[in-house]
Image (cartoon, grey):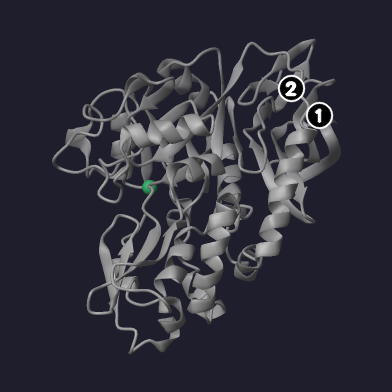
Amino acid sequence: MRNHSSLLRTCWVIVATLCLLADSNCSIAADALDRLDLDKLRQLKVAVETLKTDRQPVTRTSEFTDYRACLHVHSFLSHDSNGTVEEIVKAAKEVGVRVLMFTNHPAVDYDFFTDGHRGLVDGVLLIPGAETTGLLSFPTASVKDKLGSEPQAFVDAVQPNGGMSFLCHLEERMDWELTGLTGSEIYNTHADFKDEARFIRVLRDPLALMLKLGPALREYPQGVFAALQNYPADYLKKWDAMCAIKPHTGVSANDAHHNQGLKATIEEDGNLRIDDGLGEKVALIDPEKLPLIKPLLLGKKAGDVVFDLDLDPYARSLHHVSTHLLMKDLTEANVREALQNGRAYVAFDWIADPTGFLFQLETDGNNYEMGSELPFISGMTLHAAAPLPGSFRLIRNGVEVARDLGRSGEFPVQEPGIYRVEIWLNLEGEPRIWILSNPIYIREPESK
Ligand SMILES: [Zn+2]
C-alpha cells in the first residue's frame, strides 16, 4: 500500500480513500459509483440474504476439508497498520477465516520471521511472512540477512524447506519472470491506485459523496466495500500465461490493514480536523475558505465528530475475499502443502459462502483435485459443483471454451490444456465473479 498522505489535504481525501479501495480493474469507475446508490445497496443486501436460503451442500468425494485462508494481512508490525493480533484473530473468527498469513513490511527493528505472529490462536492458525521486493514471502527460517536482495535472489533464499513466494501487486510487475515462485496474487483488494485521476474527474462533488457515503457505510458496510470489486482480467491474463510455463498457484490478497478511514472533528477554533484511519491528523480545514463543507457543520460545536468513516475494519476486509485451501487438518505444514500443490480456490465470500466448491478431474474411476497434473487420455471428464446455481465457465489456456448453468458443470476433456473454472452469480441483474478455481493441468500424452 502506498503512502498517500500528500493527497489528503482537502475534502478530496474521501475520493482518495475510495480509490485506495479500488481493485485492479476499476476502470469502470461509473459502475462503482452507481453501486454506492442507497437503493442499489439495499437491493444487493436482500440479494445476498436470499442466496443464503438457496444454498445446498455439495456432496464431494474427497478426503479434504475446505479451510478459509487470508493471505496478505498486515498488523502493527507494519508501519501502515495498528492492528493487534487480538483484533485480527477476533475478526477472522467472526467471518470464518481459519488461516491468517501475515505479510508485514520488514523494518530494521524486527525480524518478520522470528518476531512474526505464528501458531494457533483461539482456533486460528497464524503464519508469519512479509511483503517485500514485490513478493509475499513465507520462509521457514529467518531471511533477515537477505532483505534488500534482488527479487530472484530473495525467492531463492525463501524457498528451502517449504518456503513460499507469491508475486504480489501484479499491476506493477506484469513483465517479471522469476523462477521458483509458488504462485501469484490473482486478485488484490487494494491493487490499483492508477485510476485515481479518473475517479476524481467523475466525482465532481465531494460533499455529496461524503453525505452519501456516511449513510451507505452505516447501513451497508460490506456492500460499500464491495462496490469497487471487479473482474481482475489483467491479473488473470498474466496468471494464465505463468501457468502455461509451470504450475502456479493463484491466491487472493486481502491487503488488510485497517487503516482506511476518515474522522472529522471540530476544533476549538472552529476549524475542521481530519484524521486518517490510523488516527493521524492529515488536514485542517477552515470552513470559511471551503464553504462547501459548511452544511456539514450545522448545529455542531467544538469537540463534535462531524463524520467518522471506517472503511476497512478487519472483519470487512477478511470477509470480502479469501483463498480456500483443501487440507486434511489445520496445520502450517498442510497449508504449505496445499498452496504448493495448487489445491486452493479464490472466492468472494462476501457474496456467498462457497464452502464445498469442487473442481475435479475424473479419469479411470479416480478423482483428482485442483493442481493435479496428468497426461491426457480419452474419456477424461472435468466436474465442477457449487452450493449455489451460477454460470460455470470453463477456461482452457486462458480462453473460455464451455459454459454450463446450474449448480454443477460437466465437461468432457477433448484435448490437453490447462483448465480452470470460474463461477459467476447474477446479483441484481449484474454478473459478478464469485469463484476462481486453480487449474488442473492436462499434459500431452507421453510419446511412445
Ligand atoms: Zn500490503
**Residue at horizontal 32%, vertical 33%?**
85
Q: Amino acid at mark 2?
A: Leu
Q: Is residue 377 above or below residue 192?
A: above
Helix, strand or loop under label 1? loop
Image point 43% across, 42% down: which residue?
314
Q: Is residue 24 visible?
A: no
Residue 330: image location, x then y, percent:
48, 16
Q: Position of residue 27 (x, y in %)?
A: 59, 66
Residue 82: image location, x then y, percent: 29, 46
Q: Quadrant of the C terminus?
A: top right
Front-most of 298 and 250?
298
Nearer to us of marks 1 and 2 is 2
Q: Is residue 136 above or below residue 337?
A: below
The three-letter code of the residue at mark 1 reads Val
Is 155 placed left or right of 189 in the picture?
A: left
Is label 1 in contact with label 2 (beta carbons under 8 Å)? Answer: yes
Q: Locate residue 281 relative to residue 432 in the image: left or right.
A: left
Q: Quadrant of residue 137?
A: top left
**Residue at screen point 60% across, 52% down:** 232
Crowding at mark 1 (Cα within 10 Å: few <14, some 14-19, many 20+) = some
> Quick check: 131 left or right of 401?
left
For label 1, the residue is: 413
The structure residue drawn at horizontal position 80% and vertical position 22%, both measured from the top left corner, is 380
Instruction: For marks 1 and 2, give the CA distance.
Output: 9 Å
293 to the left or right of 22: left
Residue positioned most to the left: 109
Where residue 427 appears, x then y in whole percent?
75, 51
Task: Give the numbered dot on residue 361.
Answer: 2
Q: Residues within 10 Å of mark 2 (few under 14, many from 20)?
A: many
Answer yes or no: disc 2 within 8 Å of ligand 1: no
Image quadrant assignment for residue 166: top left
